[in-house]
Amino acid sequence: MRQPTFLDLLPALAAALLLSLTPVARGAVFQEEAAEVDAPAVSAAGSLIGLEWTEDEVELMVGTIRERLGEYERLRGRSLPNRVFPAPMGTPFVPGVEPAEVQGGGAPVALRAVTRPDNLEEVCFWTLPDLAALLRQGDVSSVELTTMYLDRLRRLDEHLHCVISLLPERALAQAAARDAELAEGIDRGLLHGLPWGVKDLMAVEGTRTTWGAEPYKDQVLEETGTVVRRLDEAGAVLIAKLTLGALAMGDVWYGERTRSPWNLERGSSGSSAGSASATAAGGVAFSIGTETLGSIVSPSVACATSSLRPTVGRVPRTGAMALSWTMDKVGPITRTVQDADLVFRAIQGRDSADPYSRDGRVPVRQMPERPLRIGVPEGAFDRAAGVEEVLKELEAAGHELVPVALPDYPVRAMLVILHAESAAAFDELTRSGRDDLLRRQGASAWPNSFRAAQMIPAVAYVQAQRLRSLLMADMAAAMEGVDLLVHAPYASGVLTITNLTGHPTVSAPFVPAAGPRRDGAPRTVCFTGHPDQDEALLAAVTAWQRAHPEHVLHPPTPWLVESAPEAGKDRESKDGEGEGR
């Protein structure tokens, strides 16, 4: 390609001048001048900074860049005093926002007596404490449980496409070792001997870590993520690397589209697609997912699982694919909230290899013996008809409901933070041209987003981080005086706000009086707590869910066949896209 001349660069320089205008001046000309951000201007601007794209790629970028120009304008609409600093990385705490001195934590779990069914597969939906009780009674071995879950997951995968790699050798060796330990009186805790699966953006030594994306389908990272190591130490048995939408967006990976076990015509949403699908279908006892902007909450809604998206920084991300260093979180996807609590206890805490991880405050043994003050954001149930009935249940339990006004910020425009950080994380992929290997290539797909992000002004990114600092402080003020919030998953902008502020959120199934969804699945209600109050949040929602077991349903699986091809085999992709990043 020839070197651009000054005349070639004039359109790009005009676009740069447009970006540099003051908010007032630029506001007067934005609508008229935005039309000049066309393909030649984008191509010339790319050349100016040493990047080249095909004509088709440039045409796709134009619309995205024009849209983002409007978002930069919305960022400039907020006045920022000079004293405001960018949000700190990996923590929800800014000056004036301090963690509570004492948390309420769940009480120790007492195991009840259980009976082994004639068909062991009937335990596939049991809770973690009941599986732990069965194991400790000597009525089943970890090897038996692991073999059952491996076989079931292999058969489920033919329909759900939720597995990238089964790990039978590693799993059965672990299970045999856990059985030997129990025989010697060594008990690592309630997760001892229980089979689980991890989203395949977490490295496990000796396995492929594909990130769900064609360019990385043969990638082997010779390390093991801290969360996996901690669950190994807790005695859990890893049986599978589960699917994720490519590079942690949606439910379409390089092999197929992951499905919801409630309706095989629907995707499981994303990007923790396989983790939610496999857990809901009884293919694993629990799983690990990640979230940047909805990737635990969204598949939990689609698959009707319980889950915790923890406070940012409470669970280390060592060994996990980075998408956004300031927004990524790792958390459990389970069948009950109490199960999520048990898994969270095993994986949380500081890791020296993750500079943004930290320990929480030491929890007290139980929640305070008083009714809770539960905040209800304005419009908290506007997007989930019927789910507001949860308010009646909470009031009947003696809790006080308090109206809460959430801070009003241009949070969609503030996602320039995610656009910039994700593009930086995959800058080499973009510049190498290997982004063409990704299956999804539309305007909303990663390749186009990464390319368009090369045009994000550095000032816009920093200004968004400064607004984020103010949002954190204002969110803390809004929640002052309440113990937690209750809301529908996507209502009131809570999902985007709390992913920017780092607040923890629990998702839980809920069946209103009118009944479940058309596919038979429960609907979902969310509870959001104060930063680093994950234990208190989990304890409160566990108590509510225990009082209403009718909300926890499991999908019927009449389509489950007796045998199926080897899990993880590549398949032809079908159209579809899940939510979540």
Image: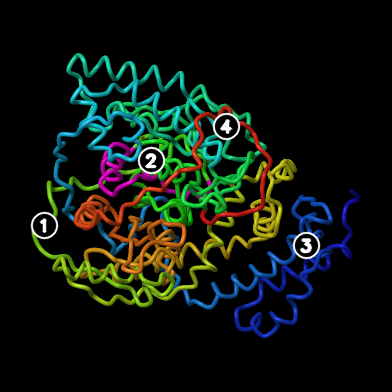
Whichever of labels 3 and 4 marks the residue nearer the N terminus, that label is: 3
Q: Is residue 45 magenta?
A: no
Cα–Cα gap, marks 2 and 4 = 27 Å
Residue placed at 30% from the left, 26% from the top? 193
31 and 404: which is toward the camera: 404
The secondary element bearing badge 3 is classed as helix
Hey, what amino acid is under mark 1?
Pro
Q: Which mark is residue 42?
A: 3
Whichever of labels 2 and 1 marks the residue nearer the N terminus, that label is: 2
User: In the figure, 30 relative to 387: above or below?
Assistant: below
Tell me whether the residue at label 1 lies in contact with that at label 3, contact meaning CB atoms closer than 8 angstroms: no
**Could you tell me residue 45's position as x and y percent?**
77, 60
Cα–Cα gap, marks 1 and 4 = 47 Å
- Residue mark closest to the camera, 3 vs 4: 4
Q: Is residue 397 left or right of residue 204?
A: left
Residue indicated by mark 1:
368
- Badge 2: how crowded within 10 Å, few (<14), some, or many (20+)? many
Residue ranking furthest to the left: 369
Q: Which residues are magenta?
A: 323-350
Residue placed at 49% from the left, 33% from the top? 241
Tell me whether the residue at label 1 lies in contact with that at label 4, contact meaning CB atoms closer than 8 angstroms: no
- Residue mark closest to the camera, 3 vs 2: 2
